[in-house]
Amino acid sequence: MAVSELEKAFGTLTEALNLTESEISEEIKVIQQQIEELKERIVELHGKQETLSHDRASISEMVNRYCDENGKPLEQK
């Protein structure tokens, strides 16, 4: 193989590696953005979960206050 052919081959390999590297870098950026979006979603869902837990406790307190042990409404006096 002549020197110019080797230079062409190395040039082609370098271009391929650069392209692969830029594709990988772009994919990493996309994945990092998705991670940030998921973190935000997790925080949002934790808030909703806390609200639901509070609501469940409130409902349970009301049931205990206004129903007997069988879940039937207490007789009003």
Image (spheres, rainbow, N blue to C red):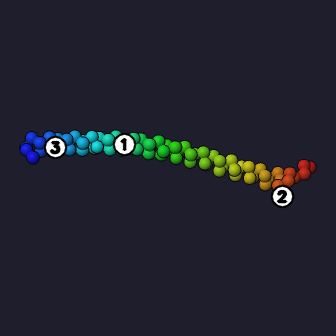
Question: Residue 7's image quarter?
Answer: top left
44 relative to 63, above or below: above
Q: Which mark is residue 47?
A: none
Residue 57 pos. (x, y %): 70, 52
Mark 3 belongs to which amino acid? Ala
From the image, tell me which residue sits under label 1: 27
Residue 33 pos. (x, y %): 41, 41
Q: Earlier in the sequence, mark 2 or mark 3?
A: 3
Q: Residues within 10 Å of mark 1 (few under 14, many from 20)?
A: few
Q: CA distance from mark 2 to mark 3?
A: 83 Å
Q: Nearer the viewer, residue 6 or 73?
A: 6
Going by the picture, which residue comes out furthest to the bottom?
69
Q: Which mark is residue 9?
A: 3
Mark 1 belongs to which amino acid? Glu
From the image, tell me which residue sits under label 2: 70
Residue 22 lies left or right of residue 12; in this view the side is right
